[in-house]
Every structure is written in structure tokens, then in C-alpha cells.
């Protein structure tokens, strides 16, 4: 594939990582992510699988080397394997270094093998608790057993699994070590995510849910020696190694840390809006230029113009005990 000048934003950050939401739908209704009664987008609003291919291929031509597929729940999108299989050609050519996804795990038993065959090697599975009842409560519609079976299938297929757990005050505080032990026993890395002020979910009080990862880390340090790792992904994650077990633990702290200076990513929604920053309302519509012309140069031009608008950083702030910088869209819209 022909390549052109790479994407560099106004702050000299090269954009090499694209996260793509392929659907706004989900088979769960996690309380911090969605309201119970969600209205989903009509089908014509969504990028078709062919359009997603064209969009991603254009980004790859502009230097994107890592693609993470997310949602909503990416594996509930009809015929999603057609899209993954289409991306395999970019892995084969070497232009794409990694094709991966974030999933709730509910459909992994069915998809683990085809995903591996398409070239996926790692998956992030979101899982906040190992208690059946608590799992049913937090996801509203999910069943823990199904997710564990999905994780089993993923590991059996040869996929490396990382668990993402949202740290929730009064909910999974007491499972910190249980989750850690469980992941260590299964040779899975574990990342904790601080809850973010996304969307209006009606009855949930976000300050009530907020459990600072600083506190979580301090609790881990009561029991273990944590060695800071230099590893940086260009995102809000920081990693430590547990000296006693060798396990890697990540902390995603978008609210308490400034990670923006090394940000290398942009996010595409399932309707073709490009968000240059997770914490800002600014976005560029790429669906219109995509649909307006079959000439990829038009789309390329729109992408370059969007990247030129990437802001320096986000405005989330809990420090004044109010949720400042809250953005109105749901996490399932931009894909997390
Ligand atoms: N359905 C898939 C899943 O759950 O992994 C992919 C989409 S989901 C929106 C991506 C990640 O965002 C999940 O790990 C989820 O826990 C996280 N998430 C959702 N709402 C959040 C919030 N308000 N704050 C922090 N993380 C959130
Ligand atoms: Fe669905 Fe993922 Fe949101 Fe949960 S976090 S409701 S699984 S999109």
C-alpha cells in the first residue's frame, strides 16, 4: 500500500493509534456506562463494514500502526469477523503492527478462534468482579459464567488476555486481592481504571462511585513491592510489576494524571465522528467526506484537517468536588 506523510498534530505528536467503535449496542448495561433504557442509532447512521474498512485503511496509509476495536460491544456487531478478516491484509503487509479489541467477553467463546486466525494476539476483557451476584448487578444484563467461558476460550485459542477492572468505591474495593490473585494464577495482566464522568446515566452519582487509584495502589503496596515500569503506551496507563509475583498491573488514571503530552491516539465512533481527545467535545465528521466521494484523497484531507485540531489536553477535574469537564456523551459512544 502506498503511504503518504504521517499524521502529526500541532503539538508534534505523531498519531499512530486509532480506536474504532464499531457499534453503540451492547448486550450488557453496565451502570457506569449506560442507562438501562438506551436508544440506539438507526442502522443507516452507522458506518457499514465496507466503510469501516475504507476508513481504517486510510488511517493506516497515514501511519496508524495500531488498531483497537471497541464499542459498545464490538462482538455483537453483525458479521464483525468480515471486518477483522479484512484488516488481516494490513497485518500481512506489515503496515499494521497490532490489531486488537476491548470486549466484555460475553461472545468470546464463539469468536476467540476466528479472531486468532485473523491475526489478533491480545484482547482486553472488562471484568470488575468475580462474584456472580455483583457481576449481575453491575452489568445489569450479564452473566459471569459466560464471560469466564469466553476468557477460557480466548486463552485456549492462544490469545493473551488482559483484564480491565473499573475501580468502584464500595463495590470492588474488597476484591482487590482476589482479582489480583485470580489474574496471576491465570497469567493475565490486570489494569484498573478510574471511573470517568461520561454521559448522563440518570440515577448514578459519579462522585459516589469514584475510588482513587492512588488509594488502590497504596493498598497494594501494603502487601507487595511495586516496581514502576518505564513502559509508556502514549495513553493514560502506567504500569508496575509486582516484585513478589512478577505480575504486571496497570493504572489508568485519566483524572489524576496528566498523560496528554504523549497522546498518540484518536477515536472514531461508529457513525464516523473522529474525536481527537476523549475529554473534549470537539470532533470532526468523517462520514460525510467518506460518503461524498470514492476518492480517498477527500477523506485523507478531512483526516489531516481534523488532526490539525487535536487539542493539547483534556479538562476532566474532580478536584473541586464537582464533576468539572464532564462530557455529555456515553463511553459506549466513543468506545473508551
Ligand atoms: N463493551 C466493551 C467492554 O466493556 O470492554 C468495550 C467498550 S467499553 C465502553 C470500554 C471500557 O470502558 C470498558 O473497560 C469499561 O469498563 C470502560 N468504561 C465504561 N464506562 C466507563 C466510565 N464511566 N469510566 C471509566 N471506564 C468506563
Ligand atoms: Fe457494554 Fe462495555 Fe459499556 Fe459494559 S462497559 S455497557 S459491556 S459497552
Image (cartoon, helix red, strand yellow):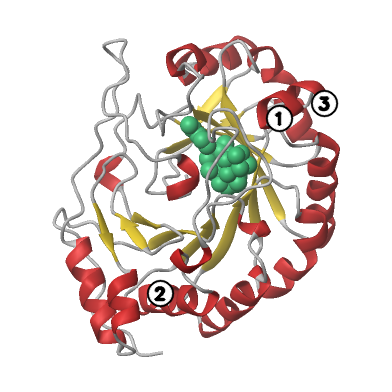
Dot 1 or dot 2, earlier in sequence: 2
Residue 132's disc is: 3
Gap in Å between the C-alphas at discs 3 and 2? 39 Å
Secondary structure at numbered mark 1? loop
Number of marks in the image?
Answer: 3
Residue 55's disc is: 2
Q: From what the image shows, is residue 274 above or below residue 85?
A: above
Q: Nearer the viewer, mark 3 or mark 1?
A: 3
Q: Are marks 1 and 2 in contact (CB under 8 Å)?
A: no
Gap in Å between the C-alphas at discs 1 and 2? 42 Å
What residue sits 54% from the left and 28% below the top?
Answer: 32
What residue sits 85% from the left and 46% below the top?
Answer: 149
Dot 3 or dot 2, earlier in sequence: 2
Secondary structure at numbered mark 2? helix
State the residue position of label 1.
245
Is residue 85 rendered to the left or right of residue 19? right
Q: From what the image shows, is residue 82 above or below residue 268?
A: below
Location of residue 206 (image quadrant) = top left
Q: Circle 2: is it few (<14), some (14-19), or many (20+) Cα within 10 Å?
A: many
Is residue 308 rendered to the left or right of residue 267? left
Q: From what the image shows, is residue 35 above or below residue 65?
A: above
Q: From what the image shows, is residue 48 above or below residue 269?
A: below
Q: Nearer the viewer, mark 1 or mark 2?
A: 2
What residue sits 32% from the left and 35% below the top?
Answer: 327
What residue sits 34% from the left and 73% below the top?
Answer: 63
Of residues 300 and 225, the one drawn nearer to the viewer in this rendering: 300
Is residue 155 rendered to the left or right of residue 268? right
Q: Circle 1: is it few (<14), some (14-19), or many (20+) Cα within 10 Å?
A: few
Amino acid at each position: 500500500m502506498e503511504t503518504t506523510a504521517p499524521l502529526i498534530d500541532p503539538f508534534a505528536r505523531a498519531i499512530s493509534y486509532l480506536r474504532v467503535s464499531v457499534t453503540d449496542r451492547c448486550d450488557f448495561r453496565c451502570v457506569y456506562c449506560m442507562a438501562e433504557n438506551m436508544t440506539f442509532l438507526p442502522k443507516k447512521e452507522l458506518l457499514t463494514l465496507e466503510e469501516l474498512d475504507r476508513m481504517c485503511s486510510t488511517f493506516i496509509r497515514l501511519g496508524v500502526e495500531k488498531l483497537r476495536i471497541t464499542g459498545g460491544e464490538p462482538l455483537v456487531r453483525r458479521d464483525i469477523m468480515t471486518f477483522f478478516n479484512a484488516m488481516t491484509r494490513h497485518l500481512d503487509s506489515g503496515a499494521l503492527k497490532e490489531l486488537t479489541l476491548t470486549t466484555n467477553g460475553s461472545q468470546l467463546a464463539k469468536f476467540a478462534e476466528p479472531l486468532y486466525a485473523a491475526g489478533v494476539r491480545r484482547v482486553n476483557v472488562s471484568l470488575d468482579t468475580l462474584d456472580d451476584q455483583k457481576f449481575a448487578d453491575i452489568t445489569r444484563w450479564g452473566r459471569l459464567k459466560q464471560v469466564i467461558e469466553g476468557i477460557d476460550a480466548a486463552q485456549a485459542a492462544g490469545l493473551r488476555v488482559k483484564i480491565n477492572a473499573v475501580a468502584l468505591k464500595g463495590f470492588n474495593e474488597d476484591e482487590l486481592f482476589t482479582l489480583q490473585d485470580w489474574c496471576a494464577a491465570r497469567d493475565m495482566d490486570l489494569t484498573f481504571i478510574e471511573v470517568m464522568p461520561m454521559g448522563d446515566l440518570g440515577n448514578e452519582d459519579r462522585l459516589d462511585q469514584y475510588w482513587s487509584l492512588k488509594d488502590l495502589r497504596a493498598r497494594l503496596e501494603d502487601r507487595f513491592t511495586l516496581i514502576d515500569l518505564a513502559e509508556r503506551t502514549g495513553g493514560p496507563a502506567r504500569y508496575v510489576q509486582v516484585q513478589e509475583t512478577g505480575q504486571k498491573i496497570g493504572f489508568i488514571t485519566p483524572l489524576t494524571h496528566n498523560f496528554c503530552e504523549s497522546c498518540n491516539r484518536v477515536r472514531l465512533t461508529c457513525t464516523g465522528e473522529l474525536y481527537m481527545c476523549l475529554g473534549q467535545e470537539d470532533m470532526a465528521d468523517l462520514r460525510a467526506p467518506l460518503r461524498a466521494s470514492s476518492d480517498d484523497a477527500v477523506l485523507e484531507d478531512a483526516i489531516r484537517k481534523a488532526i490539525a485540531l487535536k487539542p493539547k489536553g483534556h479538562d476532566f477535574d474532580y478536584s473541586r468536588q464537582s464533576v468539572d469537564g464532564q462530557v455529555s456523551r456515553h463511553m459506549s459512544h466513543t468506545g473508551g
